[in-house]
Each structure stands twice: as structure tokens, then as C-alpha cells.
Image: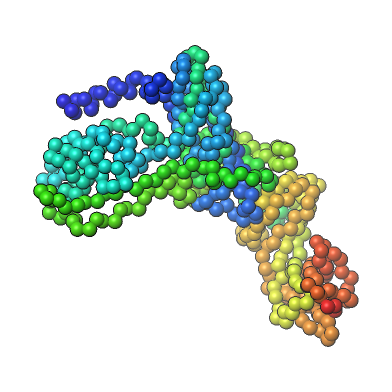
């Protein structure tokens, strides 16, 4: 009889709408469409995304179709992002508006399942390892999850897994207040029954994005092709299939502590402890004595999302479109993309051919420093971000890989970082150190002398920036110097297999 009831009663109950008091519960499991607008972590600077802990955020807008009954009802929006900021959620399209909203933080876990079924009947299943025979009987959970899991059967009270036999507990259904996925609940009062499309919009943490550039120098050595990827990281466990993807570049003014507003799901412990008492017949192999240490608690969804694997999916059919958003730049991906959980997505951001550039060798130093041993100079690539030079587009910060031709191959010349650059700015990118062009800074009589050496078979252009130290100022240079960004600038052409020098004095 018990088996018959379990087999037929619960499917029949599923045909009727669930209710909580006078409230009908309406569950929306999937969004018909979603739009994800990702904002960068403003404190990351020029560095790369941390794939395990994305510290930006996203504005998510979902369209869902639901069937409302007349009167009061509770709508459960399942499958929202783990990092949802519930206070930011806005629901539009409900005929009766929103009475109240709540982020359901109780997610499915062994401990939460025990809490939700305390005092209810479950099924205890045991397997005899000697014969392989499986027995099953009804039991009632009598303990809270913070203690031992205590069951009451027809034979009496016992602790789970204390018999020495392989055993487990099965459940007919989930408690009504326990969610498998992150859920937002809202209460509404509809004047009449209706089928309607609602829009759910909210902010969520655990996102970030960056630009990643690939520059290929052409055989002429004076122009290059520039391609950029838009890399988006989703540190949540929620997927957004076939979503509209947008990214906002620029520093957004953010004063709210979003981390403090995110409601992490509780993660109570489930203790499985055994004890001896008179008349308890433990099977051979029972581990008695002192209670065994509890297993580590299950990770909360936010922590599980932080352990994301670096799964990168690449999509490059079309290039993102740039739009204006006040003083910020908005990049809209022109096709729907899958934003997978705990993963990264790459789409084409921009593409420019034949950008004219120049290369030179650089160093930054203090006027009063001494370095008598040769130091390598840094190779720099510079170009003007103008349309007549082949560029002329805003360039968000990110990593840049520079490739140079070598016969029929392209070899990596540098792997560097680039800050945000606006249209019309002069862009400087470091392309590694060189051992063929060096600098020496040493005492020379009553002053200082800089010597640049070039071991290459062609002349090299160098730009050396010299800063005045505190209480020590550069005076009486032997060559004419310019000023750039508050520093002295020495521009020199080092002859092939030759050297160039600059003398100056330091006034203290």
C-alpha cells in the first residue's frame, strides 16, 4: 500500500496548483529571452580578468511569459544569477504590480533537505553487503541538521549510518520552500486571470570583461593589423543561453558595496555522528568511540562559482558595434550568444588594417641615479589613434599580443598591457626589452653622463625620460632637451654599431 501511494499520489498532486495559505504559487522556470550588459571591475586597471573571482557586475534583463490567476499570488522566478542583488530587482508587466519581493536564499543541500523534512516521513534504505539484499522502511527524521541525523523507525530511534550497513535516506518530494536554483519571489494581486509577459531586471555580481588585442606587424615594418576580442567572464552558476550581450567601457561611478548587498545562500553543516547505548545492536565494523569529525560544509553557490574553470568559448562571425552611452562607450554584440556558467566567452570586438606606427627605444630614470653597468632599453610601439592613420576608434584597456613576421611565420614579439585610449590619443605600447640597445648612467667629472649603445646594423631611435629627484635638478645639458609629462626628454638617433651620449649636471 505504501508503495502504491508513493507511486500514484505525488503525480496526482502535481496536477494541482501549489498554494501557500490563500496565495497561489506560480513558478517561472525559464526566460524567453535575456539581455546581459557587463560592466568592468573599476579597480582592476590594466590587468587581466581574474577568471576565478570576476569582480565586475552585470545588468540582466529577462523577459518571461507567465499565467496569473485572479487575486493574490506568489511568482517564483527561478534561475536568476547567484550574485543577484535583490534590492535592485524591478519587475514590470504585472497587471496588479508588485506587493513585495524576496530573494529565496534557501538552496538545495543535504542539510537544508533535512531541515525541510524535520518530523516528516522519509524512506530508509539498507543494503546487506554479504547478500546484496536491499530493504526499505519508513522512518521519521527527529533531529536538526546541526546534530546527529536521528531517525525513528518501528524498531526505535537510531542514527543514520550507525548500523554498520550501507544505508541512505530517500525523499518523495522537496520541501516547498527549498529551491534547486537561485530564485526571486514576488507577490502580486491581479484583478483578473491573465497570461502576460513580464520583464525582470536586476544587477548581479560575479561578471567582468576585458579587451584582448592581437597586433600583427606587416612585412614593411611600418604598419600593422589590429584585431581585438571582447572577453566576458561569468562567475555565476547560472547560464544565459542565446542572450543579447553588451559591454560598457569607461569608469562607472560606483559607491554602493554590492558584495554586502548580495544574499549568500546559507550553508549549514550536516552532522553524521554515532553513539553507543544499551541495547543498540551495531553490525561488525561499526566505528564507535569518540564522534567522528563532521565533513567540511558544502560550498555556497558564490564560492562554487569562484572555483570556475577557465572554459573559453570563441565566437567571431561578426564584430561588436560601438555606441555612445553618455560619457561611456557601449559595445553591442550583433548576434545572440550563449553565456555559460563559470566560463568565459570571446567575441570579435574590432578590426583595423594597415595602422601606421613607429617603433623606438625608451627608458625612464632619475637624474641623480648611477648605473655604470649597461641596461637594456625597452622597445616601444607608438601610433596615433586617428582615422587617417588607420585607427580612429576608442580602445578599451586590455592585454595585447604583438606578432612580427619571420620568413613565412609570425612569431610573438611581446605580450603586454594597454590602458584605455580615446579616439585621437597617441598610443604607446611596450614591446619587450632589447639587448642590442643599452644605456649606461655614470658619474662624469662634476656631472653625469648617459651613453646609449646600438649593436644593430641599422640606426635606432631612442627617447629617454629623465626625472628630477627630490632636491636634485638636472641643469646644463650638453644637448637640447624637451619636456614630456613633467620629465626631461632626450631624443636621440643612435648610429648603427655606434653610440650617443648626453652630459649634464645635477644641482642640489
Residue at 65 percent of width and 54 percent of height: 45
The quarter of the rendered structure image containing the N terminus is top left
Q: Is residue 146 visible?
A: yes
Q: Residue furthest top?
A: 192
> What x and y, as percent, mark residue 434?
68, 70
Say which of 55 and 276 sits in front. 276
In the visual, does 120 lie left or right of 194? left
| Quarter occupied by residue 474 | bottom right
Residue at 50 percent of width and 19 percent of height: 189
Q: Is residue 350 visible?
A: no
The number of callouts visible is: 0
Q: How is the image coloured?
A: rainbow
> What x and y, as percent, mark residue 411?
62, 60
> What x and y, as percent, mark residue 183?
45, 34
159 up-or-down from 374: above or below:
above
Residue at 29 percent of width and 21 percent of height: 12
> What x and y, as percent, mark residue 360?
76, 64
484 up-or-down from 348: above or below:
below
| Quarter occupied by residue 323 | top right
287 up-or-down from 4: above or below:
below
Say which of 101 and 127 sits in front. 101
The quarter of the rendered structure image containing the C terminus is bottom right
Residue at 64 percent of width and 45 percent of height: 255
Q: Residue furthest bottom?
A: 445
Say which of 189 and 355 sits in front. 189
Amino acid at each position: 500500500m505504501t508503495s502504491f501511494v508513493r507511486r500514484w499520489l505525488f503525480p496526482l498532486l502535481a496536477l494541482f496548483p501549489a498554494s501557500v495559505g490563500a496565495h497561489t504559487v506560480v513558478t517561472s522556470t525559464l526566460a524567453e529571452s535575456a539581455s546581459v550588459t557587463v560592466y568592468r571591475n573599476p579597480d582592476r586597471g590594466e590587468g587581466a580578468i581574474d577568471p576565478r573571482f570576476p569582480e565586475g557586475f552585470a545588468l540582466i534583463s529577462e523577459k518571461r511569459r507567465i499565467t496569473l490567476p485572479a487575486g493574490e499570488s506568489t511568482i517564483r522566478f527561478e534561475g536568476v544569477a547567484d550574485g543577484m542583488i535583490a534590492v535592485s530587482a524591478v519587475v514590470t508587466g504585472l497587471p496588479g504590480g508588485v506587493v513585495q519581493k524576496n530573494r529565496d536564499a534557501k538552496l538545495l543541500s543535504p542539510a537544508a533537505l533535512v531541515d525541510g523534512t524535520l518530523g516528516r516521513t522519509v524512506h530508509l534504505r539498507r543494503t546487506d553487503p554479504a547478500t546484496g539484499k536491499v530493504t526499505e522502511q519508513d522512518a521519521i527524521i527527529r533531529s536538526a541538521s546541526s546534530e546527529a541525523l536521528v531517525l525513528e523507525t518501528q524498531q526505535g530511534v537510531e542514527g543514520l549510518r550507525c548500523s554498520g550497513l550501507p544505508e541512505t535516506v530517500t525523499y518523495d518530494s522537496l520541501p516547498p520552500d527549498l529551491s534547486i536554483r537561485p530564485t526571486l519571489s514576488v507577490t502580486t494581486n491581479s484583478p483578473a486571470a491573465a497570461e502576460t509577459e513580464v520583464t525582470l531586471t536586476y544587477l548581479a555580481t560575479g561578471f567582468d570583461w576585458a579587451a584582448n588585442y592581437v597586433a600583427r606587424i606587416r612585412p614593411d615594418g611600418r604598419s600593422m593589423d589590429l584585431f581585438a576580442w571582447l572577453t566576458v567572464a561569468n562567475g555565476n552558476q547560472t547560464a544565459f543561453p542565446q542572450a543579447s550581450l553588451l559591454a560598457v567601457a569607461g569608469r562607472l561611478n560606483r559607491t554602493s558595496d554590492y558584495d554586502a548587498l548580495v544574499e549568500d545562500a546559507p550553508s549549514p553543516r550536516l552532522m553524521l555522528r554515532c553513539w553507543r547505548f544499551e541495547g543498540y545492536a551495531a553490525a561488525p565494523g561499526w566505528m564507535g568511540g569518540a564522534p567522528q569529525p563532521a565533513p567540511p560544509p558544502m560550498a555556497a553557490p558564490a564560492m562554487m562559482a569562484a572555483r570556475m574553470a577557465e572554459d573559453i568559448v570563441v565566437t567571431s562571425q561578426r564584430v561588436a558595434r560601438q555606441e555612445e552611452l553618455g560619457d561611456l562607450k557601449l559595445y553591442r554584440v550583433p548576434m545572440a550568444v550563449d553565456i555559460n556558467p563559470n566560463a568565459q566567452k570571446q567575441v570579435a570586438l574590432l578590426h583595423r588594417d594597415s595602422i601606421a606606427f613607429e617603433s623606438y627605444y625608451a627608458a625612464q630614470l632619475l637624474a641623480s641615479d648611477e648605473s655604470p653597468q649597461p641596461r637594456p632599453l625597452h622597445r616601444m610601439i607608438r601610433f596615433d589613434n586617428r582615422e587617417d592613420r588607420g585607427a580612429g576608434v576608442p580602445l578599451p584597456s586590455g592585454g595585447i599580443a604583438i606578432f612580427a613576421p619571420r620568413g613565412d611565420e609570425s612569431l610573438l614579439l611581446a605580450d603586454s598591457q594597454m590602458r584605455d585610449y580615446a579616439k585621437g590619443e597617441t598610443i604607446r605600447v611596450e614591446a619587450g626589452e632589447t639587448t642590442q640597445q643599452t644605456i649606461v648612467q655614470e658619474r662624469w667629472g662634476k656631472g653625469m653622463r648617459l651613453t646609449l649603445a646600438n649593436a644593430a646594423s641599422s640606426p635606432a631611435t631612442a627617447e629617454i625620460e629623465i626625472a628630477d629627484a627630490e632636491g636634485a635638478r638636472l641643469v646644463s645639458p650638453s644637448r637640447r632637451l624637451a619636456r614630456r609629462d613633467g620629465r626631461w626628454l632626450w631624443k636621440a638617433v643612435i648610429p648603427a654599431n655606434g653610440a650617443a651620449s648626453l652630459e649634464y649636471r645635477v644641482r642640489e
